Structures are given as C-alpha cells and as structure tokens.
Amino acid sequence: SQKIEQNSEALNIQEGKTATLTCNYTNYSPAYLQWYRQDPGRGPVFLLLIRENEKEKRKERLKVTFDTTLKQSLFHITASQPADSATYLCALGSGGGFKTIFGAGTRLFVKA
Amino acid sequence: DVKVTQSSRYLVKRTGEKVFLECVQDMDHENMFWYRQDPGLGLRLIYFSYDVKMKEKGDIPEGYSVSREKKERFSLILESASTNQTSMYLCASRSGQGANEQYFGPGTRLTVT
C-alpha cells in the first residue's frame, strides 16, 4: 500500500542554521508533492508545491527538492528563526485526482 | 482573506450519541474534505465531496456519513459515536483538482467518553 514516511522524531536546531526535513514515499508515483505547516491547535497551511517534472522549487527562505528516483523530497528552511517552529507535513497526489495523501509530519524546534 | 470555519473547536460527547460537525467555506470551492488527525498517523481522509449532493468515500469512512446540501457547507455525521472516534477533525476545501492547495479549517477536537 502507499506509504509516506516523515521523521517522527522532532528536529531541534539553532537559530540561523538550515533546517532540513525529509519525506520518503513507497508504492506510489505522485504527480506532485506539497508541503504544509501546522501550528499547535490549528489546521495545516499550504507552503509549497513541486511537480514530478521539477527538481527544485524556492520561495523566500524555503526550498523543496523532489527526487522521483529516490522517491524522496527534502524541505529546507534557511536562516531559521524561532517563529519557524511548527510541524511540517508533506502530501502527495496524482495528477487530476481528488485525493491527497498526507504524511504524519515532523516537528521542528528552532532555539534562539 | 479566504476562510474555512468549523462549528466547534472542542466537543465532548458520550458513546452512542449522534454527532454533527459542520464546515463552511467562503471561497466558492467545488471540493471539500473531511480528515481526522491522530498522533503518528497523519491526516486520514474520511469523505470528500466534489459538488453539491455528491460524495465519495475516503480511506476510513466506516462509522461516518456526510452531507453537502449547499456548495459552501459540508457536514460530517457520526451516527453513533464511539470512543475510537476521539480525534482531531479537520475540514478542507479546494478549487478544482490535482495539485491545487487545500485550505483547512482550525479543526474540531472531539472527545467521546
């Protein structure tokens, strides 16, 4: 069955460093991959989309890579700030479909 | 500013009660979704709707039903609540298909005792 794996252990980094989160998937050939941010007690908020024919996408301090051979996406936050502390979810979908499959998320803590 | 609202942030119900969770979006989106979120399991799709009065089962529809009588409103119904339905319930809406982003509501934390 389709499976998405995100590091279940929290990631702790120092302010100013680059945070790198990993999303691996199996038994799936997604047409796109999304990253969402979720703060405690709130719904997820969309951050970035990357499609299967794209290797890398950037938005301000965020960078996402998508390697369909390794079946992996990396999500980078450069010059991290305490305000970046949150849970980050990756989500996969097939082209034209209704359903999106979400990972369980990785909790990021950025210390000042 | 786009908005998805959910009727309650916190809800406590007894086993066997009928529970209604309501979701309203103001973006004229065709698609609406109900998920539940449990620690370590991520968001799991319960039901979705791609048009008024249209619904499709998601991955875990057992014990739930839905209703979409108006485009902006999507209701999740627990016919007879059970303790294993204690969870965070998230509603989302989306325009069109595929890679378009989903907009989520704040969630309803339901506890069934």
Image: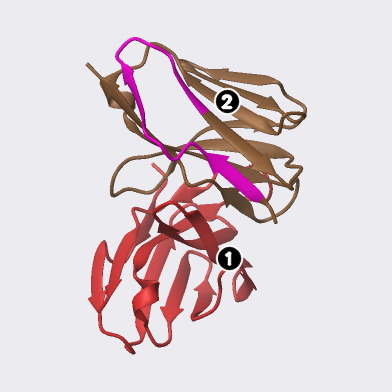
Chain colours: A brown, B red
- Is A92 covered by the magenta stretch? no
- Taking the spot 69% from the left edge, 47% from the top edge, the residue there is B98
Residue B86 place in picture, x, y as percent: 34, 70
A72 or B99, nearer to the observer: A72
Q: Chain of mark 1?
A: B
Q: Are the residues under badges 2 and 1 in a single subunit?
A: no
B39 or B44, nearer to the observer: B39
Q: Is residue B104 above or below residue B108?
A: above
Q: Is residue A13 above or below residue B60?
A: above
- Taking the spot 72% from the left edge, 29% from the top edge, the residue there is A70
Q: Chain of mark 2?
A: A
Q: Which residue is mark 1?
A: B48
Residue B105 place in picture, x, y as percent: 39, 54
Give the amino acid at mark 1. Phe
Q: Secondary structure at mark 2?
A: strand
Q: In the image, A112: left or right of B67?
A: left
To which quarter of the image does residue A53 belong? Answer: top right
Looking at the rendered structure, which numbered label has been put on residue A74? 2
Q: Residues within 10 Å of mark 1 (few under 14, many from 20)?
A: many
Q: In the image, B64: left or right of B39?
A: right
Q: In the image, A24: left or right of A9?
A: right
Looking at the rendered structure, which numbered label has been put on residue B113? none
Give the amino acid at mark 2. Leu
Q: Is residue A22 above or below residue B3?
A: above
- Taking the spot 58% from the left edge, 37% from the top edge, the residue there is A34
Magenta span of residues: A3-21
